[in-house]
Structures are given as structure tokens and as C-alpha cells.
Amino acid sequence: MTASVLPDVTSAGPRVVMILPTYLPESFGGAEHQTQRFAQKLAHRGAAVTLLAPRLERRTLAREREGSVVVRRFRLRAAPNLGGRHLEAFLWWSVCICAWLWRNRHRYDLIYVVHGRLHAFPAAIAGTWLGKPVVVKPGRGGEAHFDLSVVRRKRLLGSFFARGIARNTTAWIANSEEIAADLTRWGVPSERVHAIPNGIDIPEDGGRQPRNGVVHFLSMGRLDAEKAVDQTIRAFAGLPADTPACLTILGDGPCRAELEALSRRLGQEKRIVFTGAVADVTPYLREADVYLSTSVSEGMSNALLEAMSHAVMPVVSRVSGVADVVEEGVAGLAFVPGDEHELARRLHEALIMPAELRRAMGDAARAAMRTRFALHEVAERHLRLYRSLTEEDTCASS
């Protein structure tokens, strides 16, 4: 392993190392895209940002620059947050992360870990050893899905790793009230919890296209079990066959073939379109009337924020972050996760409501984004936190 060179920065901005369990182009979910945009925004505001991630495919670059952001990837056989039969990958990841952080210890001020799963453990421990503040942003909320709860359920030393992450994290980013409550249940002092939502670049206008009489439903994200897209397909297929509606599913993942087969069995080939991974979702959002999500767990869904920023009315499962974002009956509709009866009812409600009401809810959703979730404001809140932590660290060392 050779230490990559961090950029020399003349600005007064903090030098931040961001650590992820997956990243583009090997994984293209909302968290990866949000992290990419967030890192660029930090760099634009004067921070020096280096991103550390695994590299599972040989063709993926080990080092590259994305604008002002340096990306360094470590070759692994499996994602470092899995453990279990992939323990070897986690152990090698731990060696790579600790070695990199040690070799570059004079060239960064703070460690920021995206999600508090198993991959966060070496970063949290190394930060404590090196006297660097460690900030962790959990990825899922809810007692069963909260990051530390997932780590604790690992059969081999799960409780040890979960306690290690919890005790060695300087500050936590809670992007939803549910995640803040999860941290409280884990005994994290309130002064270490910072309520900062995810951010989104708000388009200058809604960019909506003229309607053609067909109600366009849109689903987007990773096609894995946690997104429960099979529920989306079954609920949509339950609408009358002559319903003027279509569903577009953006994204890719391990469940795609199974979901396409389900759509065919239900006779939905002409009404449901699978696009695969899409680099730019904007054209699809401009054509959409309703954003639909049946996810069983989230932290704060970036796909939801993006849809709302384009004035697309959401119909979403009531998971972590939704109550913070969607005002029920004003900026969208919500249903209990896994309740397919209620999902079908909400879907039908969105379908038959007057187009003017759908647009009004979409406009209210966009207004909520402009008020609280603009990415530049979210980035500035993070920078203030980073400066406060590094200043405290400097004072403690002097």
C-alpha cells in the first residue's frame, strides 16, 4: 500500500477525510450520489476533501480526482461492512484504513464516516489513537435497522464492534428525529448528537413538462430487498387495467431480474418500465407526477429529497426521515411500511385526485426543500461543526 498524496490547500477550510463502505461507480445509490455532491460542495466552500472507499472491481480506478476532491480506493474482495463470511475483507479494510490514516496524519484534521456500520470501526479507533475528531453519519433509523443495532447482531464480536464505534465517535450526525432517538437509546449524550438533514441542490424551477393525461409514477433507487420494490409493482398492478397510468423504475441492483420477472407475471410489461442505472434522473423527474417509495428502512432518503425538489408529489412509506420531510396531506401521502393494503389505497388516492391537487402537493414539497434542505446551507452547517471540533481538539492538545 502506498499513501496517496492529499492536496495542498491554501484556504482556511478544514481538511476532511470521508470514509464510505461503497462508492461510485461500483454502487450508485442515493447515499453515494449525495456524498459525491456533498463532498464537492464542501470543497467549493474551502475544505480539502479526500474520499476513501473500497474497490471491488479491477477496472475501477484506485486513485482519481473528482473536481477538487481526491478519491482513493482500496482493493477488496467484498464490501467492508458485511463481516461474517466476508470477515477477511473487513480485516484487510481495517489494515488499509488504519495505515492510510497513520501515514497521512499530518495532512487532515477530521474523519467523517458515512454510515455507522462495521466499516466505521477502524476509522473510529484510529481517530481516537491519532487524536482526530471522528464524525459518523448513520444511514438507517429505527430500532431494528439502526446502524449500531445491525453491527451488534453480527455473530462474531458484533457487540464489541458496535461498542467500539459508539465509544470512539466524537460527534454524530442525526439527519432525522428517529435517528436522534436511536442514538439516545444507545446512550449517546445529547451534546454529541447534531441534527443536520441531508441536503439537495434545488433546481431553479420545477422544470415540469406538460401532461398528456397519463399519471406518471416514478420509483428510483437501489433494487435490493430493503427497498421492497416488489410491493410497488404489486400495488401498481392492482390498479384497473384501463387506468391511464404508467410506472418507471430507475436503478439497478441484486433484485432487478426478480422484479422484472414479477412485472411480467402480473402482465405489466406495457405499463412498467425498468431503465437500469441512470446517470441523470432530471428528465424522468420532469415527467413524473408521483414519486413512489415502499422502502422498509431509511435514514433520510436522498431520492425522496430529489423528487420533492422537482415538485413531484411523494407517496412513501413512513420510515425514518419521512416525518421530518413530508407534511401529510399537504406535501404528500405516507403509509405504514409493509402494509400493502394501505399502500394500494394511497396509490389509488394519488391516481384519482385532481391534477391540480397533485401539483399543489408537489409545489408544497418543493417549498419545503427550499426552506430547510438546500445543500449549500447543509454544507455550511457541517463546516461549522467541523471547525468547532477541530478547534476543541487544538485547545485540548495545547
Image (spheres, rainbow, N blue to C red):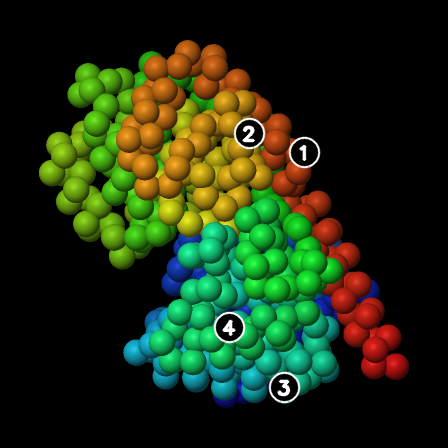
Q: Is residue 244 left or right of residue 362?
A: left
Amino acid type at mark 4: Ala
Name the spot of residue 282 as percent of width and height, x first.
46, 37
Residue highlighted by disc 2: 327
Residue at (31% x, 46% y) in the render: 228
- Report helix, strand or loop for mark 3: helix
Measured Cα–Cα span from mark 2 to mark 3? 46 Å
Graded by Cα atoms within 10 Å as few (under 14), some (14 to 19) or many (20 or more), the crowding at tag 2 reads some
Measured Cα–Cα span from mark 4 to mark 1? 35 Å
- Report helix, strand or loop for mark 1: helix
Residue 284 visible, this angle: no
Amino acid type at mark 3: Trp
Residues 119 and 144: in front is: 144
> Residue 368's image quarter?
top right
Graded by Cα atoms within 10 Å as few (under 14), some (14 to 19) or many (20 or more), the crowding at tag 1 reads few
Of callouts 4 and 1, the N-terminal one: 4
Graded by Cα atoms within 10 Å as few (under 14), some (14 to 19) or many (20 or more), the crowding at tag 3 reads some
Residue highlighted by disc 3: 102
Name the spot of residue 1 as percent of width and height, x first.
50, 88
Of callouts 2 and 3, the N-terminal one: 3
Q: Is residue 67 left or right of residue 132?
A: left
Residue at (61% x, 64% y) in the render: 187
CB-based contact (under 8 Å), mark 3 and mark 1? no
Residue highlighted by disc 1: 371
Amino acid type at mark 1: Thr
Find residue 162 and name its label.
Answer: 4
Residue at (55% x, 29% y) in the render: 327
